[in-house]
Image (cartoon, coloured by chain):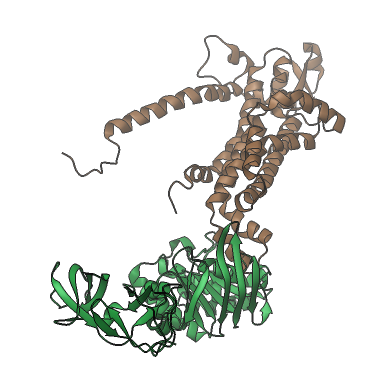
């Protein structure tokens, strides 16, 4: 019998099984994303060709179409124009069109960034204050309060769409950045309070007590000693909040139109403009993926620690 | 440094009374230990001195100033926690500098004070290290450094050696005491470990169930305990209590024990109760060949320099300390007698020691 290996270590077979399951899962989840990214670099024709092209000549047509508004022109008009200045104008001309201006993608995208990061910041900030209070102080009816906070998550947020729609119209918050940030913050708060309270409970009180004895007020102790130790929890919570606010579609459709419209309700409207422009949609969704991806990768090491936090006493 | 006075200090958490009307005076430059079993209120008392808990009633004077209801940050004291509470996101230098940053000192002053404290504790080579990379003893030193860097009026320590291993604990006991003397500190130290208390303290206050039972020097606490609880809690094993069924009157100097009579120190107080106790330490008993109290050896514990015998007698189980080379077997019939006149009579009605020639 081989006794060189610890009995707690996995055997060769179970390792292989685990690896196989992970690889299959990866293929299932990554194929649609790969296809989407590939489509964004195809030309309109190759995107809809049958059988589908796995190998193709890359083109930036999708991205050009995403960022511009174009109009189709007769051939003799196009010939009368001076030669195109830029590569993207040339690309558009070759499709017998001219660029009439920038599309709304960039403003919609920046709306998404402002609202997404804004809501994430406030959810985490307010959530950590509430979580700290619930973790440390005698709050009257604490358990009921915590349950109430959780209960706001028990129905789908869209269930209250109609009252919120009416409320926002009366308050003048419809189609504003502030309105959307408030809405997403509120939806996320229950999650962030609960997650962060768990993390705050794990931080020994001695740290802030030491700081208070060292001459700091409780608020200073919270910011200088407690918060830095809750970074793990804050990172994990921020990712969850960010993913929700970034992806949210239903409220965005309902409450925003021009000024504060985010990317999720905007991207499908690309479909309507002059036929099914799959490369442009692919480009829009690919760009839409990037910020959350970067955000998650940056906070990844905290997230991993966050999931295992408290499992083993430090 | 300063004197600390506690007057009628009372603390309750709902129905639970943690500290009952306690009075203590901790002298300037004194190493004062609060000793007691867990839940006796010693840590609560310390936390009230620190300002981490507010008293239900009563006063705490630090240097004659009433600080009982002030915030911790306004009291100018330092606290060393059992788990050190070093800030894990800062290196050693920043941990030491943290209390100074609140004092609006210039950067060079802060650096100088940090270095001075670090040198005193011999951790100056560790200043740039991460706290998490330190060994237990060095963490302990950093925690002490953070306490003394500000030169506060008093040091409060809550079982600071509790997490160290035994060998290191003895070393730190010596170091702590030396440090205390070197910087002329006033220290209040909480522990449940009587050896720590005995070896370091100028005075020990023994607490139980929220009450300060006795505050005296280690020698007095050990030899002349004022209550049965103190007598039993201090010493390992604790004092033997032999029930005596007679009323004690002042100037009495012997008692009846089974069939014989036993000399005791001349009593200065009497009792109303007929059920009292004779207290005698295991080392104040000896084995004899005749005329002693007869008993059966129930257990023998070998402890290197000594043996502890547990003897089953008609008076109950009695513990005796003998030399480690004494040959005794389990179930052997033996006799024992008192070695000297250091017995204490405890009043059965209130468990208090009676005053006598020996104890006053």
- Does A184 sit above or below residue B184? above
Horizontally, is B44 left or right of A249 in the view? left
Horizontally, is B101 left or right of B233 in the view? right
- Does B36 sit above or below residue B271? above
Residue A154 picture quarter: top right
Can you say which quadrant of the picture contains the C terminus of chain B? bottom left
- Report the label total: 0
- Does A85 sit above or below residue B232? above
Q: Is residue A219 visible?
A: yes
Q: Where in the figure is residue B352, as x and y percent of width and height?
A: 44, 77
Q: Where in the figure is residue A20, as x and y percent of width and height?
A: 36, 27
Question: Relative to the observer, which residue lies in front, B244 or B335?
Answer: B244
Q: Is residue A83 visible?
A: no
Question: Relative to the observer, which residue lies in front, A137 or A18?
Answer: A137
Horizontally, is B126 left or right of A198 in the view? left
Residue B357 picture quarter: bottom left
Residue B250 picture quarter: bottom left
Horizontally, is B9 left or right of B200 in the view? right
Q: Where in the figure is residue B210, as x and y percent of width and height?
A: 52, 67
Question: Relative to the observer, which residue lies in front, A17 or B225?
Answer: B225
**Which chain is rendered green in the image?**
B
Q: Residue at x 53, y 19 (%)?
A: A56
Can you say which quadrant of the picture contains the N terminus of chain B? bottom right
Q: Residue at x 78, y 28 (%)?
A: A164
**Which chain is rendered brown in the image?**
A
Q: Where in the figure is residue B142, as x and y percent of width and height?
A: 49, 70
């Amino acid at each position: 019998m081989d006794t060189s290996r610890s009995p707690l270590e996995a055997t060769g077979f179970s390792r292989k099984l685990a690896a196989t399951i992970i690889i299959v899962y990866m293929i299932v989840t990554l194929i649609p994303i790969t296809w989407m990214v590939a489509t964004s670099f195809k030309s309109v024709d190759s995107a809809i060709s049958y059988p589908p092209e796995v190998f193709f000549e890359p083109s930036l047509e999708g991205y050009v179409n995403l960022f511009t508004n174009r109009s189709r022109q007769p051939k003799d008009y196009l010939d009368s124009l001076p030669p195109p200045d830029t590569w993207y104008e040339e690309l558009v001309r070759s499709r017998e069109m001219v660029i009439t201006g920038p599309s709304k993608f960039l403003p919609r995208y920046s709306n998404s960034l402002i609202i997404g990061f804004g809501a994430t910041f406030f959810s985490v900030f307010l959530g950590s204050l509430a979580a700290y209070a619930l973790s440390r102080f005698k709050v009257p009816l604490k358990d009921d309060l915590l349950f109430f906070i959780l209960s706001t998550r028990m129905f789908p947020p869209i269930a209250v769409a109609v009252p919120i729609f009416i409320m926002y119209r009366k308050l003048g918050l419809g189609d504003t950045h502030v309105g959307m940030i408030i809405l997403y913050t509120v939806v996320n708060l229950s999650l962030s309070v609960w997650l962060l309270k768990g993390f705050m409970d794990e931080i020994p009180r001695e740290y802030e007590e030491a700081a208070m004895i060292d001459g700091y007020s409780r608020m200073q102790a919270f910011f200088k000693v407690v918060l830095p130790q809750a970074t793990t929890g804050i990172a994990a919570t921020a990712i969850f909040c960010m993913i929700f606010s970034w992806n949210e579609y239903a409220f965005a459709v309902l409450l925003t139109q021009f000024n504060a419209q985010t990317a999720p309700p905007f991207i499908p409207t690309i479909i309507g403009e002059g036929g099914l422009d799959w490369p442009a949609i692919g480009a829009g969704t690919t760009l839409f993926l990037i910020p959350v991806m970067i955000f998650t990768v940056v906070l990844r090491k905290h997230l991993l620690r966050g999931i295992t936090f408290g499992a083993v006493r430090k | 440094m300063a004197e600390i006075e506690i007057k009628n200090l009372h603390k309750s958490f709902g129905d639970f009374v943690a500290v009952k009307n306690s009075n203590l005076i901790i002298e300037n430059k004194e190493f004062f230990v609060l000793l007691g079993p867990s839940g006796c209120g010693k840590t609560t008392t310390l936390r009230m001195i620190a300002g981490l808990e507010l008293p239900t009633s009563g006063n705490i004077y630090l240097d004659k100033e009433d600080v009982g209801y002030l915030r911790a940050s306004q009291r100018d004291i330092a606290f060393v926690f059992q788990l050190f509470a070093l800030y894990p996101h800062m290196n050693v230098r920043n941990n030491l500098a943290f209390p100074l940053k609140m004092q609006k000192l210039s950067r060079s002053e802060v650096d100088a004070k940090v270095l001075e404290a670090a040198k005193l504790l011999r951790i100056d080579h560790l200043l740039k290290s991460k706290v998490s990379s330190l060994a237990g003893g060095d963490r302990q030193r950093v925690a002490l450094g953070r306490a003394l860097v500000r030169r506060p009026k008093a040091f409060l320590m809550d079982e600071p050696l509790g997490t160290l291993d035994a060998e290191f604990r003895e070393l730190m006991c010596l170091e702590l005491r030396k440090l205390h003397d070197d910087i002329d500190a006033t220290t209040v130290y909480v522990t449940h470990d009587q050896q720590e208390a005995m070896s370091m303290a100028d005075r020990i206050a023994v607490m139980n169930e929220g009450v300060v039972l006795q505050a005296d020097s280690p020698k007095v606490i050990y030899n002349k305990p004022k209550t049965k609880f103190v007598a039993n809690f201090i010493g390992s094993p604790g004092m033997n209590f032999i029930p005596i069924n007679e009323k004690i009157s002042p100037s009495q100097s012997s008692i009846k024990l089974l069939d014989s009579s036993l000399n005791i120190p001349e009593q200065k107080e009497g009792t109303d109760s007929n059920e009292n106790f004779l207290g005698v330490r295991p080392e104040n008993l000896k084995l004899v060949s005749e005329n002693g109290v007869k008993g059966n050896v129930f257990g023998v514990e070998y402890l290197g320099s000594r043996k502890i015998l547990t003897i089953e007698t008609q008076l109950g189980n009695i513990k005796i300390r003998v030399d480690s080379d004494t040959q005794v077997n389990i179930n052997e019939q033996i006799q024992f007698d008192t070695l000297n006149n250091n017995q204490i009579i405890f009043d059965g009605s209130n468990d208090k020691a009676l005053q006598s020639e020996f104890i006053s």
